[in-house]
Amino acid sequence: MIYDVIIIGGGVIGCCIARTLSKYDLKIALLEKEADISMGTTKANSGVVHAGYAADRQYIKRHLSIHGNKLYTQAYRELNFPFQRIGSFVVAVEDSQIKDLEDERKKGIQDGVPNLELIFDKKRIKHMEPSLTDDVVAVLHAPTAGLVSPYELTFALAENAAMNGVKFFRSHEVVKIKHTDYTFSVRTLRDEFKCRNLINAAGLYAANISKMLGLDYFDIMPRKGEYILFDRNAMHLNKILFPIPTVVSKGILVCPTLHGNTFVGPNAQNITDTEDTSTTEAGLKEILEGAKKLVPNLPLRASIRNFAGLRAVPNTHDFIIDNTDVYGFINVAGILSPGLTSCFAIAEKVEEFLELLGVVMKVKEDYNPIRPRPERFKDLSKKELDKKIQEDASWGKIICRCEVIPEKEILDAIHAPVGARTVDGVKFRCRPGMGRCAGGFCRPRVIEILSRELNLSYEEVTKKGEDTNYLICHTKDLLLNEINKGEEAE
Ligand SMILES: Cc1cc2nc3c(=O)[nH]c(=O)nc-3n(C[C@H](O)[C@H](O)[C@H](O)COP(=O)(O)OP(=O)(O)OC[C@H]3O[C@@H](n4cnc5c(N)ncnc54)[C@H](O)[C@@H]3O)c2cc1C
């Protein structure tokens, strides 16, 4: 079979492109090297849907993020992922910083960022965000900035794309590409695929994919950002808090999440290893010092996890979205921040490129843009829950006590289109293991459920794919064998 379009990379960008193209009468496949989608940069970032004024005007990322922010409104209605426009503050703590904020505001308004406001009234500022430092002299308020759960957005995109016919191939690392007679042959570690058009959305590895076709015109460098996460309800923030930005990043944020946690970070360190997501003492110190300048009273005792994400930084410092010299090959590379914000606008750009390439873009009659909202225990009233438990007892079996997740939500995560196959896949879809005990109680139960539902032995269930198995053998059997051997010898 020859696909019309193959997408390499199952991060938010690849999945958003897949979902956007799934409305057309096209044969589409997505190839992802990891055991699950959304496990690259998309898994660990700030989850902020930026208002869009932060990048320089010379960069397309500015214009795509301003437009992308607006596209979230409709996408949220259709895809039912966690998203909320709570607004952001950029916080000035010295009078000398006010001029920069005023410039940002003016340029932002000229470029279409709605309702940007510079606020000087300290009483009003503190009323809007009581946790903020008393040193504040002014804030730039962007009410259209929001929070999204990046991986839940990505799962929603993939589910809807799959519902509309896109085929997902996980654990399929692309290792070789040939282009002959207007057809791409794409070899993965498991299989070979053919297509007319090929889209490279491989994140940190996008330059390697481009080089497979002899296109060596950009490089991607990893830039690490570390975070500290605080427990649910440890503090309450109304706004996303940014300091005045630096040349390389938007600075260290103090930010709520949509699940009731708070995080501080990220810092920005250029590194060379594309797999190095370790956290360091120096890095954590740096982010705490930065965060305390915005919120002096952080709930330090409620810290539950440190983690790091890697930005895919291109040497052009801007998104690389190109219809390349290889006919039918589109690079969507170097999608650093604000890539999450821009994903829907980036997918529109890819749509335009495919049209330019002469691909027939006919909307399918049976296209369904709606991905139903996953049912959540915590959203149900007692009466609704009682009814559900009577109909299906798995609603009443609580597997994760920290996050209060019943077995039913785990079953739904496994049996959804492009469903969970690993313990991390379950954790990121419906949160068992995300709480204070970090999976200490629920992990064995999740392994048991995955084993039962996917017909795998316990030893075959992994954290996140190959070589990450939790259980190696039945230790009791080993001992029994030894005892039996000894008894036979006697
Ligand atoms: C610290 C940090 C903070 C950020 N904060 C924000 C923010 O607040 N707001 C915002 O808008 N953006 C933010 N971003 C940026 C945002 O996270 C990225 O723009 C976005 O996640 C990029 O998605 P992607 O799909 O391009 O990359 P990825 O998520 O990395 O996806 C690429 C996929 O390609 C796969 N792949 C690679 N090579 C191959 C191969 N050979 N074969 C098959 N598959 C392959 C990978 O496994 C991966 O799943 C932040 C990023 C970081 C690191």
Image (spheres, rainbow, N blue to C red):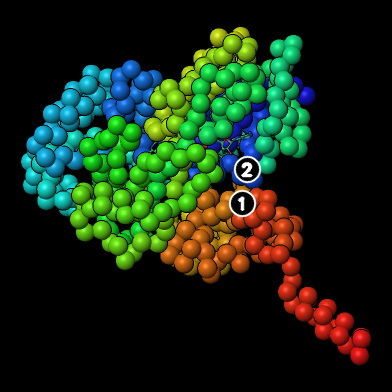
Position of residue 60 measured from the top left corner of the image (x, y, whole percent)? 39, 20
Q: Is residue 452 visible?
A: no
Q: Is residue 489 visible?
A: yes
Q: How many marks?
A: 2
Q: Establish if 217 lies above or below 288.
A: above
Q: Is ligand 1 within 8 Å of the beta carbon of the residue shown at mark 2?
A: yes
Give the mark nearer the N terminus: 2 vs 1: 2
Give the residue furthest to the bottom. 490
Q: Which residue is mark 1?
A: 464
Q: Are marks 2 and 1 in contact (CB under 8 Å)?
A: yes
Position of residue 473 measured from the top left corner of the image (x, y, whole percent)? 74, 67
Q: Establish if 350 lies above or below 422.
A: above
Q: Quadrant of the N terminus?
A: top right
Residue located 46% across and 67% down the image:
437
Q: Please give left or right for residue 404 compared with residue 486 in the image.
A: left
Kindly state the secondary structure of the residue where label 2 is placed.
Answer: loop
Residue located 30% across and 44% down the image:
252
Q: Which residue is mark 2?
A: 34
Q: Which mark is residue 143?
A: none
